[in-house]
Amino acid sequence: MFQELVHAKAFQDYLETTSFPKTPQHLYDPIRYILSLAGKRIRPLLVLMGAELFDESTVEHALPASAAIEFFHNFSLIHDDIMDVAPLRRGKPTVHQKWDANVAILSGDALLIKAYQELAKCPIDKIPALLQLFNTTSLEVCEGQQYDMDFEGRAHVGEAEYIDMIRLKTSVLLGCALQMGAIIAGAEEPSQTLLYDFGVNLGVAFQLQDDILDVYGNPESFGKQIGGDILSNKKTILFVKLQELISPDDQSELTYLLRQTIDTEPEKIEKMMNLYAKYDIQTLAIYQKEKFTTIAYEKLENIPVEDYKKQALFSLADALMHRVR
Amino acid sequence: MFQELVHAKAFQDYLETTSFPKTPQHLYDPIRYILSLAGKRIRPLLVLMGAELFDESTVEHALPASAAIEFFHNFSLIHDDIMDVAPLRRGKPTVHQKWDANVAILSGDALLIKAYQELAKCPIDKIPALLQLFNTTSLEVCEGQQYDMDFEGRAHVGEAEYIDMIRLKTSVLLGCALQMGAIIAGAEEPSQTLLYDFGVNLGVAFQLQDDILDVYGNPESFGKQIGGDILSNKKTILFVKLQELISPDDQSELTYLLRQTIDTEPEKIEKMMNLYAKYDIQTLAIYQKEKFTTIAYEKLENIPVEDYKKQALFSLADALMHRVR
């Protein structure tokens, strides 16, 4: 993991060189704020690792692209948080909470444009290809967010639809990050596609794992309240699987539980878990997660590059998927 | 004006080829809707005229850039209307009114990305320059909108600040549109800059004229209620000039008027106009408008291209500025 620390440092140093104007304050302060609440910064790391996989000497040239991806991700957080009326992000007040919705809309817009400004700093011969990939991906992320909001208002969501939604909302950006690195390193198109597919499939697997851990995770290591998704009636892989398989007899119990809160039904979580257990939902969900993980690893294996160069990406994937090898 | 109709038709035909996906409906229906409320479409026309000025044969290649500009403009309308809580746009319900604020935020985001998708369709060797200009301009438009909102909450705004705000919020996009056409036509950089400056100065002059007509326009031809800006205490060139020049004795009258509505003071418009008359504000504002118009025309004159090729742009400027020559 030493090389990842080197990348993280390089990215942080690069970010510090891209300063934002002082005024108008209400436009740029929220951008400085959201970027200061640094998350895991997986996405910019993926850009640099994507470049490193094919040509170590190009990692430096991939820094603007890694900033573009991080800026886009933070833009989407600012706007999603308005739409989801979320009070907290990374444990701190969200932008619309700290300022107001108008400030969050406009500073989000500005951050999206700043992402394109970073794109414009990439190696000039690579800009057209990077722009096309970035545009397609950005639009897909918007589509994913729209489907996610649509699903909230719907009684029934199919498993395929659900997986397509998480693919769009969260996974394509991981594939895009890796492929942008590959483009900058001058990789052949088939290799670019394999690396993109590795990222997308790993992203779907990671999101499915997140759904599973919400119910079956270790409360100490998961870091969130167990059963939170059940309490909020969130559509998850567990929920859509249950809806698909539930018998007419048990449907009334499910309908009852969906109308309850923790106050009207203190055992809402336990009772929902009983339904999951009856239909062996955990096993089925883990099976799906494994399926996407396996595809992801196969894609990476198939890239025509020496194995030792892939170790960093395999290790990162292992860490994300809590795998031991 | 015949050539302008040809451009308008070419643009409309091009727009009809760029179809939007059917789903998610809540993402793409609002985009189809705002684009169907076609405004004057001055901006895409400017892109095509900018290309035509330098090389007629490149007009066709400038169509994606003209769509990028029109998409960006409509994105900014969708988001500005949320921030301004505007119920109507071009006489029809705004997007956030017809759907809701979340739909307006996300479909606006998608339309901004679609603008960049059009940019990616431009002649490949021109993309880096176009992207850079478009990014700078887009960010300036956001800054202008933020200053505009900031000014609403402030008691005093200086004239220079006010003009800088309208330059950013509305005028740089006109300059950008023209320059994008010039870039696609392969114009030299000094010529590009002259054309950009023509657009920006004309845009400022046009906005100043709009401020003046709000109070001194012919009610029949202006198409809006006379004195609307006075009733809403809007910062305009007239208002900032008056603030600059008003004597301590008259300040109390101004302060009084700013606290009144049409109900508490039926003569608010007339009384404000008396103050404007006392300080000869109309003349001073017209002087400013003429100054920017003159600069605009000079910039266009100085472009090293045969005069007859500039006639279309001079005629458009005359029409916008109600000039007779």
Image: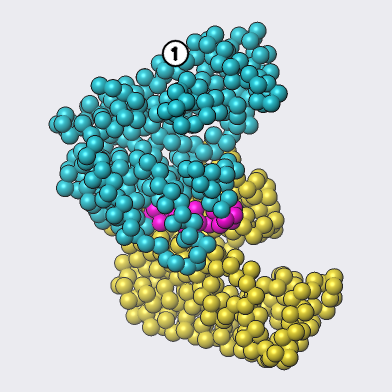
Chain colours: A cyan, B yellow
The front one of A157 and A136 is: A157
Label 1: chain letter:
A
Q: Determine if the magenta segment contains residue A163.
A: no
Q: From the top left corner, tell me how far across and down residue A139 is, in percent.
A: 45, 43
* Residue at x-position 60% and y-position 23%: A156
* Residue at x-position 79% and y-position 74%: B260
Is residue A325 among what the camera can see?
Answer: yes
At label 1, counting other C-alpha atoms closer than 10 Å, the crowd grade (few under 14, some 14-19, many 20 or more) is: some
Q: Determine if the magenta segment contains residue A104.
A: yes
* Residue at x-position 58% and y-position 88%: B287
The residue tagged 1 is: A283
* Residue at x-position 42% and y-position 73%: B196
Q: Main secondary structure of the magenta part?
A: helix
Q: Amino acid at mark 1?
A: Thr
**Position above or below: A19 against A283:** below
**Position above or below: B64 against B260:** above
Q: From the top left corner, tell me how far across and down residue B168 is, in percent.
A: 50, 70
Q: For the magenta stretch, what is the residue range?
A: A99-116
Secondary element at tag 1: helix
Q: From the top left corner, tell me how far across and down residue A95 is, in percent.
A: 53, 51
Q: Splitting the image into 4 quarters, where does residue B206 fall?
A: bottom right
**Position above or below: A20 against A138:** below
State which quarter of the image contains the C terminus of chain B.
Answer: bottom right
Position of A8 with respect to A267 (left or right) is left
